[in-house]
């Protein structure tokens, strides 16, 4: 039995990215190499924690190994402790075989993460486990309760993006208001009135227009903007800040 793994606690990560049109989630094959018959089984990135490892460090380890990125935005959003969450039995058998542990029950701590898809790097692990981005509107069946975890992660980001500047973790440093609106629409799953959206955004002092426009676009170049975190932080100290 591997002494370095804790057989009772794991972390699972709902990793969100935006491709300019759709909000997507990062999934990996459960076991692409050892059992070809099960290679189509998909899961959220996650792992049992190592003894002595802080939970957020475990989540950061999992994501760095998959994306090649450091200092990734991570936020804990839930604990999943259903005694029967490790079902069906053949999925539990897989976990026991993979970990080398007599796993009976695992409580998982869930995090959501926001990364820029175009900055994610291929790693040995992401290649081996065929890490791919899937639209949040059509997440395929996952092992254990991972669909429930993914759904809860999406519910959380939909709620928190209205009061926290999370979207700027998913956008380029310089962005247009159209890009910003498309991201909100992709996350919220609905269309927003263009005129009202622009009015609200233009009233926010921490979204700063630049004297720059897009390059290399087939339409009239739009003005670029940046998010000023210093202005946002100063404003938040004295007020409840609402994005939309």
Image: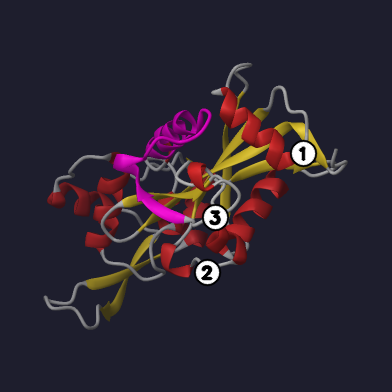
User: Does 134 appear above or below 179?
Assistant: above
First in residue order: circle 1 vs circle 3? 1
Direction right: furthest residue: 3
Q: CA distance from mark 1 to mark 3?
A: 19 Å
Inspect the magenta stretch and tell me whether residue 133 lies in it: yes
The location of residue 73, given as percent across then percent down, is: 56, 53
Question: Of residues 149 and 128, which is closer to you in this image?
Answer: 128
Q: Quadrant of residue 211?
A: bottom left
Q: Which residue is mark 1?
A: 100
Residue 63 shown left or right of residue 171 in the figure: right
The location of residue 121, given as percent across then percent down, is: 52, 69
Residue 100 shown left or right of residue 208 in the figure: right
What residue sits 40% from the left and 43% below the top? 161
Q: Which residue is mark 3?
A: 129
What residue sits 63% from the left and 16% below the top? 83
Which circle, 2 or 1, is nearer the viewer? 1
Q: CA distance from mark 2 to mark 3?
A: 14 Å
> Which contiguous range is marked in magenta?
132-159
Q: Which residue is mark 2?
A: 121
């Amino acid at each position: 039995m591997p002494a370095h793994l804790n057989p009772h606690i794991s972390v699972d990560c709902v990793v969100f990215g935006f491709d300019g049109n759709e909000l997507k989630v990062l999934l990996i094959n459960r076991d692409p190499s050892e059992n070809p018959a099960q290679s189509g089984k998909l899961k959220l990135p996650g792992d049992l924690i190592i003894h002595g490892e802080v939970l957020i460090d475990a989540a950061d380890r999992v994501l760095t190994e998959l994306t090649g990125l450091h200092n990734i935005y991570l936020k804990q959003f839930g604990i999943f402790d259903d005694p029967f969450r490790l079902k069906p039995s053949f999925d539990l058998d897989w976990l026991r075989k993979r970990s080398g542990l007599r796993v009976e029950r695992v409580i998982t701590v869930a995090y959501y993460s926001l990364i820029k898809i175009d900055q994610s790097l291929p790693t040995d692990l992401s290649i081996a486990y065929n890490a791919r981005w899937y639209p949040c509107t059509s997440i395929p069946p996952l092992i254990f309760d991972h669909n429930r975890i993914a759904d809860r992660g999406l519910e959380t980001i939909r709620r928190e993006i209205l009061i926290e500047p999370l979207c700027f973790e998913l956008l380029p440093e310089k962005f247009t208001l159209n890009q910003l609106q498309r991201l909100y629409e992709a996350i919220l799953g609905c269309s927003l009135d263009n005129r009202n959206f622009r009015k609200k955004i233009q009233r926010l002092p921490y979204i700063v227009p630049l004297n720059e426009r897009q390059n290399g676009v087939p339409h009239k170049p739009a003005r670029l903007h940046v998010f000023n975190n210093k202005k946002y932080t100063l404003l938040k100290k004295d007020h409840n800040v609402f994005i939309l």
